[in-house]
Structure formats: C-alpha cells, structure tokens
Amino acid sequence: MAGGPAHAASTLIAKAEKQAKASPNDIAAWNRLGDVAFRSAVFDPANYDHAREAFTHVLELDPDNLDALRGLGNVCFDQRQLDKAIAAYQHYLRLKPKDAQVLTDLGTMYMAQQNSHEAIARYSAALALAPRSFPAQFNLGVAYLMLNDNPNAREALSRARSLAPGDAARTRIDMLLARIDSNEMAKGTAAGRSR
C-alpha cells in the first residue's frame, strides 16, 4: 500500500540520511538518523543495519556519546545480540549509572543469557531508582522464577501486579502466580509421598 507507514518511514530515513551525510561530523544529525532508522525497523528489519551504522559512526566521533551507546544497545537488544547489547549498556551506565531504563534493559540481556543473578542485581538497582517501574518489577519476578526462588518470585510478581499497565499484564502475572502455586502443590504432594 503506497503511502503507508513503511513508505513514510522510508522517506524519513532518506531525509535523515541525506542530512547526516551532508555533515559527517554532525553528531546530532547522525544520532537522529540512528533513531529514525531504529524506530522504523518495526516496518522493515533491514533498517536495524542503518541504525547500527549511524550509531557506530557517532561512537567513532565520540566514544562516550550517551545517545549512541543507548541506541546501539537497543539495536543489539532487539536483534538478540546479547554480548554487544551488554557492552553498550555497560559503557553507557559507567557514564550515567542512575538510568533505571537502561539498568532494566541490561538486566533483560543478562536474563536472556540465563544469568539470573546478574539480572536480579540490575532489576533491583533499577527499582531502587524507580520503585514504580513495571518492567523492572515484572522481570525481577521472572528472574527469581528462573532460579526456582518461589517466595521472592511471588513477592516481586505481586508488586508487579499492582503496577501493571493493563488487564493483559495482570492476566500474565496471574498465570505466573498460578504456576508458582501449582509447583508448590506438586512439591508438597511429592514430599507427602516420600514419608
């Protein structure tokens, strides 16, 4: 469909790319290109490459550029390039350690690597900064579940339920809480049989 969202995104990228290439040292223009390409990747995943190239260009000019570090981390996050996302987020957090959203994203990358202990540390740090962060609270519960730590998982998920942005999130949490209950019942039954 001509003129749809994908076409509009393509037009925006072309305009941002023209502006950036006209000014190779204009960090703001290159970050804008990276951001537009990243946001449009929902319509065309090939745009992740444009975003990565733009953010990498910025980091060649300014290795500590927060927008580019976060942007590169987000591109790698979405493409499940875990080590690269972790490296970008860690660099970002060395410069800006009190960013709850980036701490949460870093935790999620650790959780994807099955490193629940590191994930829990990042989610806890994020919640110390932003106690009402639903993503950090929910993911904290999931990380505890991965460790089979049902008491902490239940506590974290119950808090997340009170912060849930809508019915779909509450339903998902209710399903996880029911899973904890059924696991505990199964353990109780097994313990009863062994006596």
Image (cartoon, rainbow, N blue to C red):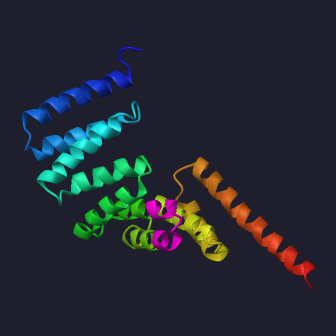
Give the residues in magenta. 108-120
Please report the residue visible at 65 percent of the width from the left and 72 percent of the height from the top. Answer: 148
Residue 165's spot in the image, x, y percent?
A: 51, 52
Q: Residue at x 50, y 74 (%)?
A: 117
Q: Quadrant of residue 86?
A: bottom left
Q: Is residue 133 visible?
A: no
Q: Quadrant of residue 95?
A: bottom left
Taking depth in this image into account, of 14 and 57 the one nearest to the observer is 57
Look at the image and tell me in which quarter the N terminus lies.
top left
The extreme top residue here reads 2
**Taking 27 as reference, is 171 left or right?**
right
Where is residue 146 shown, x and y percent of the image? 61, 67
Q: Nearer the viewer, residue 44 or 158?
A: 44
| Quarter of the picture holding the C terminus | bottom right
List x then y, in percent, for residue 131. 43, 69
Outermost residue on the bottom side: it is: 195
Q: Is residue 117 magenta?
A: yes
Left or right: 59 with respect to 50? Answer: left
From the viewer's side, name the closer residue of 37 and 180. 37
The answer to if 116 sits in the magenta stretch is: yes
Residue 130 position within the rendered picture, expressed as x and y whole percent measured from the top left: 39, 67
Report the predominant secondary structure element of the magenta stretch: helix
